[in-house]
Image (cartoon, coloured by chain):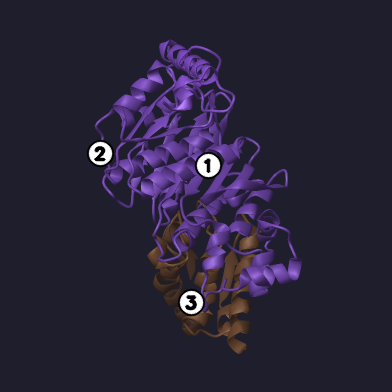
Chain colours: A purple, B brown
């Protein structure tokens, strides 16, 4: 007979091993110290979700669900969502545990939900039951869509909560819609100043963002990607928050993808030759200052696109401008350009309008 | 002769090209600006273009509409300058940029 079945020291070892195994099996699930090495223990709700949504990919949103303050974690979450979308994988989004959610992150959830629904990919989730996070999700229309039977076609235009001013409205489009943004800005002014006004610099910035998505988000074709604009009105703060996103290739990947014949072909090597910048964070700073435009065209005006958006910020039309694209997060006002560990495939802009921003009276030409 | 963009074209001027969206600079040039400036040159009168009163312009709007008169429509720089007046009281930079784009398109054509 084999030694490990007969010898005393092996018998003792096997007995203790069996007892330990039995104790573990009898221990109530979830009891005991959480392992410092493995994933957190599952509670009854989690186990029910796993059973019920067994063929869904389960994605947990970061506890601090704010793109501006917890960029790396939220970008990792967005990348996982995008991966599921591209693989047509059903997804269960865990939001029940989130401690805080900012308006800037909502656009990610709402746009993802609509895109999944439009492509007939199942999208489910759990949510915080109460508190500010629950309220914010409800205001965005996210809960109504995910719990309701509303269907979305695979189309160029989406409107979520379009008439619900003073809450959160989200708009998805593929072309430049200056008429739509002008109307949204007038409504924003109503919240800030109590009357409809023109904020020309915000209109300019949004036109630049929409044109960038149209022309550069998809390297294979124009009009290949949607842009999404989410607007939150805060009556108490007299403040309106704008979040704009596209899930294209992002600023740097787009520049790298330009082929011979394109104005921007070879622009990055030329910029590197000229400025010897360290990483994309510095490159974005240079682009916003108009150096890319100047290097390629020799034009002394800062030009269109990103430098134009910065110009609107510096002229006082908008506040608190942030740009996140690929591996860079720029807090433009603080001149803080951070290199990210997680690369975001797309471009995200955030800015605010308040009573200190520049504006003009609304003129009725009729 | 006078064109007030916000009244005669749109209070929400849009992108550079027609394919990018409504009320583009290309559309403005082809439908309003080109016929008006051509007539102004022919009749030897001044065309006044008032850019005030809109919701705001994309950064390429003036380049495409005014620079395009020389680059795409083949009009002569001197003829345009002689017969064009720009009113831009809200944002004086618009006027500066329009003349800059005209000069730029002219210079580029000379090379």
Q: Which residue is mark 3?
A: B37
Q: Which residue is mark 2?
A: A151
Instruction: For the residues labelled 3 and 2, say whether their Cβ atoms are less than 8 Å apart.
Output: no
Tell me if residue B34 can be seen: yes
The subunit carrying tag 1 is A
Residues at marks 1 and 2, CA–CA distance in whole angstroms:
28 Å
**Position in image of residue A224 (x %, y %):** 39, 59
Label 2 SS:
loop
Number of labels in the image equals: 3
Are the residues under marks 1 and 3 on the same chain? no
Q: Which residue is mark 1?
A: A76
| Badge nearest the viewer, 3 or 2 | 2
Q: Is residue B59 left or right of residue A311?
A: left
Badge 1 or badge 2: first in the primary sequence: 1
Q: Is residue A63 above or below residue B91?
A: above
Dividing the picture into quarters, in which one does residue A92 lie? top left
Q: Is residue A290 left or right of residue B20?
A: right
Q: Is residue A248 above or below residue A93?
A: below
Q: Nearer the viewer, residue A244 or A42?
A: A42
The subunit carrying tag 3 is B
Mark 2 packing: few (<14 Cα in 10 Å), some, or many (20+)? few
């Amino acid at each position: 007979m084999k030694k490990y079945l007969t010898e005393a020291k092996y018998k003792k070892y096997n007995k203790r091993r069996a007892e330990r195994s039995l104790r573990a099996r009898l221990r109530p699930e979830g009891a005991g110290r959480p392992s410092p090495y493995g994933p957190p223990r599952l509670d009854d709700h989690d186990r029910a979700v796993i059973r019920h949504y067994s063929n869904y990919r389960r994605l947990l949103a970061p506890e601090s669900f704010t793109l501006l303050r917890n960029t790396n974690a939220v970008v990792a979450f967005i990348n996982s969502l995008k991966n599921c979308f591209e693989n047509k994988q059903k997804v269960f989004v865990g939001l029940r545990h989130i401690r805080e959610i900012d308006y800037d992150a909502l656009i990610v959830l709402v746009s993802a939900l609509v895109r999944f629904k439009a492509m007939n990919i199942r999208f489910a989730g759990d949510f915080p039951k109460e508190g500010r996070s629950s309220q914010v999700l409800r205001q965005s229309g996210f809960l109504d869509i995910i719990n309701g039977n509303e269907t979305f076609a695979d189309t160029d235009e989406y409107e979520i909560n379009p008439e619900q001013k003073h809450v959160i409205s989200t708009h998805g489009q593929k072309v430049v819609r200056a008429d739509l943004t002008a109307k949204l800005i007038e409504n924003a002014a109503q919240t800030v100043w109590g009357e409809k006004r023109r904020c020309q610099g915000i209109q300019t910035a949004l036109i630049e963002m929409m044109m960038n998505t149209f022309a550069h988000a998809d390297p294979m074709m124009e009009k290949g990607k949607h842009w999404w604009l989410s607007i939150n009105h805060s009556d108490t703060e007299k403040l309106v928050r704008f979040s704009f996103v596209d899930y294209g290739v992002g600023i740097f990947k787009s520049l790298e993808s330009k082929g011979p014949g394109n104005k921007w072909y070879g622009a990055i090597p030329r910029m590197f030759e000229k400025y010897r910048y360290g990483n994309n964070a510095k490159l974005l700073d240079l682009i916003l200052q108009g150096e890319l435009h100047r290097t390629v065209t020799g034009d002394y005006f800062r030009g269109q696109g990103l430098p134009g958006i910065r110009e609107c910020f510096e002229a006082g039309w908008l506040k608190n401008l942030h740009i996140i694209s690929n591996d860079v997060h720029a807090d433009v006002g603080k001149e803080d350009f951070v290199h990210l560990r997680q690369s975001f495939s797309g471009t995200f802009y955030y800015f605010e309008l308040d009573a200190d921003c520049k504006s003009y009276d609304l003129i009725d030409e009729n | 002769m006078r064109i007030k963009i916000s009244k005669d074209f749109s209070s929400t001027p849009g992108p550079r090209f027609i394919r990018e969206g409504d009320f583009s600079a290309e559309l403005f040039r082809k439908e309003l600006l080109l016929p008006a400036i051509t007539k102004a040159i022919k009749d030897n009168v001044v065309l006044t273009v008032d850019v005030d009163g809109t919701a705001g312009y994309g950064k390429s709007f003036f380049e495409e509409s005014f620079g395009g008169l020389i680059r795409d429509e083949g009009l002569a720089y001197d003829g345009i300058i002689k017969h064009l007046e720009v009113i831009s009281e809200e944002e004086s930079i618009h006027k500066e940029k329009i003349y800059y784009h005209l000069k730029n398109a002219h210079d580029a054509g000379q090379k």
